[in-house]
């Protein structure tokens, strides 16, 4: 007999320490079945954890029915007596003007809204409704796009982001499980028509690839992929913890550059080398956007085989250079600016 969903989610929350007594939690509620299930589940668990819940609904203004979604969430919040903030964003315009993907732009704008509302209300925990199916889709997306273990770990139960804690209490729950729970309690939700849009890779994976894998290979493929993500996360957490200590011992910072002794770096296991590389890049540009496994392979080739003074140019202007038995990480524009300043100094000295 399957455990009650409330007990299952509560156990998951306690296992990963996603909530503490008296927490103020911001819940993202789109109106779809996933977010409605999360919102209602947390509402029912609120007495146990003495939670103060706030909802935020983000109107993306893409679909004709977006206004009706907002009305639905407002009605549900009023029924449950929960405070709600409705915010509007314009990802379609931003994506076109910035020549970026709509998915990435919408996510970035949505998180900016979460951050703004959380600051206004004084909240440090933001609950999102990602579930087991989302996790499986994310793992496949990362594999298809060429990710390493960091990417295959997909979404964590708890992530620190800009001083906030992003929590995902539903990662062990299947979408059908959530919908069945809502149906049994006569709780309605809204359907998002954009989930059928074949332009989005996630939708193609959800509506074509996963059904194919379930029918032809393994009916429980989504559960298996989610389990893979969880195992990789645990292994990655150990690697990251070990790497941070070693990185702090090796890294020497000077004028916007990070120097790491090559001979000591090459003595380390490649998993640690890779993580130290990530830590250096992250320190310089504060994130690892657009850095994937093929970039690591190019940097690895620099470490082992290329001659001194060789360089690898990574996305967003990051340069990795081999100089005098050291590996140096820096932003290309910092190096260029420094060269110009040195040249000006030489010219001024010569003129004088």
Image: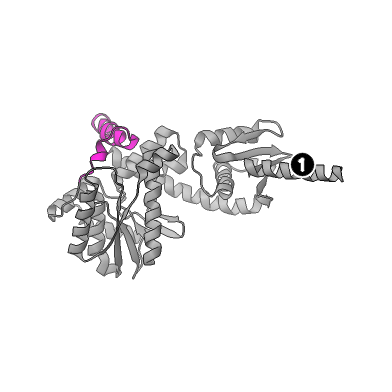
Q: What element carries label 1?
A: helix
The residue positioned 39% from the left and 67% from the top of the image is 122
Please provide percent x and percent y for residue 343: 77, 41
Q: Mark 1 points at which residue?
A: 343
- Residue furthest to the top: 216
Colouring convention used in this rendered image of the protein: one colour
Q: Is 121 a magenta residue?
A: no
Q: Is residue 69 left or right of 138 when viewed as pictured?
A: left
Q: Is the magenta stretch mostly helix, strand or loop?
A: helix
The residue positioned 28% from the left and 36% from the top of the image is 206
Q: Residues within 10 Å of mark 1 (few under 14, many from 20)?
A: few
Asked whether the viewer can see residue 290, the reply is yes
Q: Classify residue 24 by image quadrant.
A: bottom left
Please provide percent x and percent y for residue 52: 30, 68
How many tags in the picture?
1
Q: Is 200 a magenta residue?
A: yes
Asked whether the viewer can see residue 267, the reply is no
Front in this rendered view, residue 85 or 53: 85
Question: Where are the magenta residues, as a range?
Answer: 191-220
Q: Is residue 286 left or right of 82 when viewed as pictured?
A: right
Please provide percent x and percent y for residue 219: 24, 36
Compared to residue 96, the image places residue 107 above or below, namely below
Q: Is residue 122 left or right of 331 when viewed as pictured?
A: left
Q: Classify residue 316 by image quadrant.
A: top right
The residue positioned 40% from the left and 38% from the top of the image is 96
The residue positioned 33% from the left and 39% from the top of the image is 137
Compared to residue 215, the image places residue 285 above or below, namely below
Front in this rendered view, residue 314 or 151: 314
């Amino acid at each position: 007999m399957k455990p009650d969903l409330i007990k299952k989610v509560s156990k998951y929350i306690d296992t990963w320490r996603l909530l503490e007594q008296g927490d103020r939690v911001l819940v993202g509620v789109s109106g779809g079945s996933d977010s409605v299930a999360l919102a209602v589940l947390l509402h029912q668990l609120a007495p146990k954890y003495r939670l103060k819940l706030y909802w935020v609904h983000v109107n993306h203004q893409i679909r004709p029915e977006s206004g009706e979604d907002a009305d639905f969430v407002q009605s549900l919040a009023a029924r449950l007596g929960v405070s709600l903030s409705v915010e509007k964003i314009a990802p379609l315009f931003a994506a076109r003007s910035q020549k970026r993907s709509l998915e990435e732009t919408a996510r970035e704008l949505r998180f900016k809204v979460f951050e703004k509302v959380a600051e206004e209300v004084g909240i440090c925990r933001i609950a999102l409704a990602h579930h087991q199916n989302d996790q499986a889709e994310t793992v496949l997306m990362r594999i298809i796009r060429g990710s390493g273990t960091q990417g295959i770990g997909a979404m964590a139960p708890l992530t620190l982001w800009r001083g906030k804690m992003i929590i995902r209490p539903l990662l062990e729950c299947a979408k059908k499980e959530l919908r069945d729970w809502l149906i049994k309690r006569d709780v309605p939700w809204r359907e998002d028509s954009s989930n059928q849009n074949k332009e989005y890779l996630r939708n193609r994976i959800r509506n074509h690839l996963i059904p194919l894998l379930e029918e032809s290979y393994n009916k429980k493929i989504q559960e298996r992929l989610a389990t893979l993500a969880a195992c990789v996360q645990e292994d990655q957490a150990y690697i990251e913890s070990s790497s941070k200590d070693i990185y702090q011992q090796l890294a020497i910072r000077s004028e916007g550059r990070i120097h790491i002794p090559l001979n000591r770096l090459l003595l380390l296991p490649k998993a640690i080398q890779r993580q130290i590389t990530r830590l250096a890049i992250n320190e310089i540009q504060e994130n690892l956007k657009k850095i994937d496994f093929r970039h690591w392979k190019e940097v690895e080739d620099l470490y082992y085989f290329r001659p001194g003074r060789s360089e690898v140019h990574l996305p967003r202007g990051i340069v990795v250079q081999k100089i005098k038995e050291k590996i140096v990480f820096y932003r290309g524009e910092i190096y260029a600016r420094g060269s110009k300043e040195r040249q000006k100094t030489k010219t001024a000295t010569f003129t004088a």
